Amino acid sequence: MSSNPFNDETLNPFDFAKDAAAKIAELTSIASHDIALVLGSGWAKAADLMGETVATLNAADVPGFSKPHVEGHSPTIRSIRLPSGKHALVLGSRTHLYEGKGVRAVAHAARTAAAAGAKIMVLTNGCGGLNTDLAPGTPILISDHINLTTLSPIEGAKFVDLTDLYSTRLRNLARSVDPTLTEAVYAQFRGPHYETPAEVRMAGVMGAGLVGMSTALDAIAAREAGMEILGISLMTNHAAGIQKTPLSHEEVLQAGREAEGRIGKLLAEIVAKF
């Protein structure tokens, strides 16, 4: 098999996800997981607060996963037993579109989670914000997205409805934990460069309040797989042209470090409601 198995034109991505889920079940000794989480920049602390870690896997030991290429993302997959007795699958190793592995690689985490039994997918990220009334370090629920990647993980003539993609039910549940949570539309750009000020203005005119380089494609794949989706962003900075200082990944990491305890506790409390 090549270093990037998704380059194999004969690969069935759903069968490959089933292989990955079977490997997770074997290595964790948990036959099925109820909830899956993809933890982006700043969100990793939530995994320590949700419950008892049953198993921690090296992501590279699971078919289709690899060590993350971005600092701030975990190289592990964790199985966590929640206080309710349910099991959560925490996928720290997110593949971004800009890594050049293709859309199938991006969608693999969602498809594997569904194959592992998960009915709910929680997608988190660190992103830029357009609302100057909100300070960096603010968690924001994703109400909808604008996919500016020009791509879709769905293959063939499958017409998947994306209405209420980011579940109203789950957003209401999140606000029952923290009534101050606000929400916004998220625009995914391809990256890895940050958006230009003109692109940020364009996204704002289109209705976006958040901009980033992940999540939308993951959410589409999760919906195709039949999961209910909750999206939460950590606004790590104001977007280009709004923030007057140059953007940097170190700034994103620092904002994540400063907020991780608070947002980790928030996410753990939300997951406990599932």
Image (tube, helix red, strand yellow):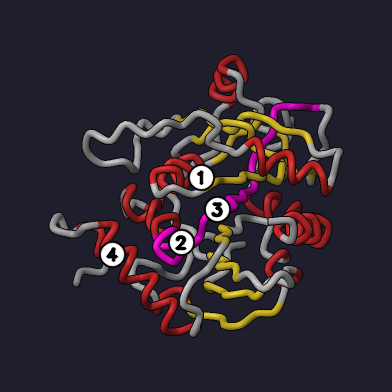
Q: Quarter of the image containing the N terminus?
A: bottom left
Q: In this view, does 192 lie above or below 164?
A: below
Residue at image point 68% right, 68% down = 47
Label 4 environment density (alpha carbons within 10 Å; few <14, some 14–19, many ≥20): some
**Magenta segment:** 112-132
Q: How many labels does the image show?
A: 4
How far apart, in angstroms, are the residues tagged by discs 3 and 4? 19 Å
How far apart, in angstroms, are the residues tagged by discs 3 and 2? 8 Å
How far apart, in angstroms, are the residues tagged by discs 1 and 3? 15 Å
Q: Is residue 79 above or below residue 181?
A: below
Residue corresponding to mark 2: 113
Q: What element carries label 4?
A: helix
Is 175 placed left or right of 227 in the picture?
right
Residue at image point 34% right, 43% down = 153
Residue corresponding to mark 1: 214
Residue type pointed to by label 1: Ser
Residue corresponding to mark 3: 121
Residue at image point 75% right, 27% down = 131
Q: Is residue 248 above or below residue 16?
A: above
Q: Which mark, residue 16?
A: 4
Label 2 environment density (alpha carbons within 10 Å; few <14, some 14–19, many ≥20): many
Residue toward you, 108 or 199? 108
Residue toward you, 159 or 191? 159
How far apart, in angstroms, are the residues tagged by discs 1 and 2? 17 Å
How far apart, in angstroms, are the residues tagged by discs 1 and 4? 22 Å
User: Is 183 within the magenta?
Assistant: no
Which numbered disc flags the more N-terminal residue, 3 or 2? 2
Label 3 environment density (alpha carbons within 10 Å; few <14, some 14–19, many ≥20): many
